[in-house]
Image: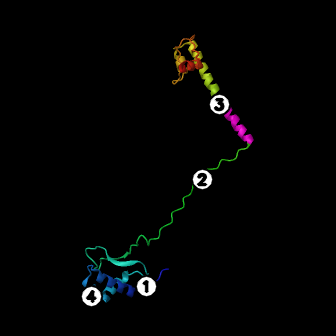
Amino acid sequence: MVLSMDKRQFLLAEHERIRTSGQIFWPEWRSDFERFFEDILDMTPKWIGARYLGPRDKALGIVPGNVEWHFKKQRAAERPVPKPAAKLAKRRAAPKAVSASQKKKLVQAAKEERRKRIAEEFRRWEELQRAGREGENSPSARRRMPKNSKSHLGVAKDRRAEMVDYDATHRARTC
């Protein structure tokens, strides 16, 4: 609720406060309240508030042309504490329920995709093997071979991997 104020009473209180504060106060205003009232009346606010008259430049003090209205600082306990803004929780979209028939279709599609990848890998392996038989060091064979390929075209064709009996090796180590 905003109340209008009696300017005369307000300025009288300010005049007394300034005189007793020990601030530099223009001598004509110090001795004559009516002169102070006439000079400050035009700039006095119309509504009650936490205002006080203060100097613009503290070194000059309260003199004509160097006064302005200041607002009183509120103590931390008196300040209204703003409520924290409610955080909008980012909700993840709930997964939609999938029917049994749709699940089967998804599983079949995943299996088919896996089959295609394996077939493509096997096809590339076959091409590499064919290229190795045609000409191990031919430029066309090198072009078809991927750069990160681990197959070695220079390996002899009749060489086979050794068969290892892992159970026998394990028994031999433990005994």
| Element class at badge 1 | loop
Q: Which residue is depicted at the point 69% across and 35% down?
A: 109
Q: Which residue is mark 1?
A: 5
Q: Which residue is depicted at the point 55% across and 12% down?
A: 135
Q: Which residue is mark 3?
A: 114
Task: Specify the amino acid type for callout 2.
Answer: Arg
Residue 42 drawn at (x, y percent): 37, 83
Label whose residue precedes the other's in the sequence (2 or 1): 1
Q: Is residue 138 above or below residue 107?
A: above
- Look at the image and tell me whether residue 109 can be seen: yes
Task: Specify the amino acid type for callout 3.
Answer: Arg
Could you say which quadrant of the image residue 158 lies in? top right
Look at the numbered discs 3 and 4 and tell me whether their residues touch, using CB distance below 8 Å: no
Label whose residue precedes the other's in the sequence (1 or 3): 1
Query: What is the span of residues highlighted in magenta in the rendered image?
Result: 100-114
Task: Report the disc number at residue 91.
Answer: 2
Task: Specify the amino acid type for callout 4.
Answer: Ser
| Element class at badge 2 | loop
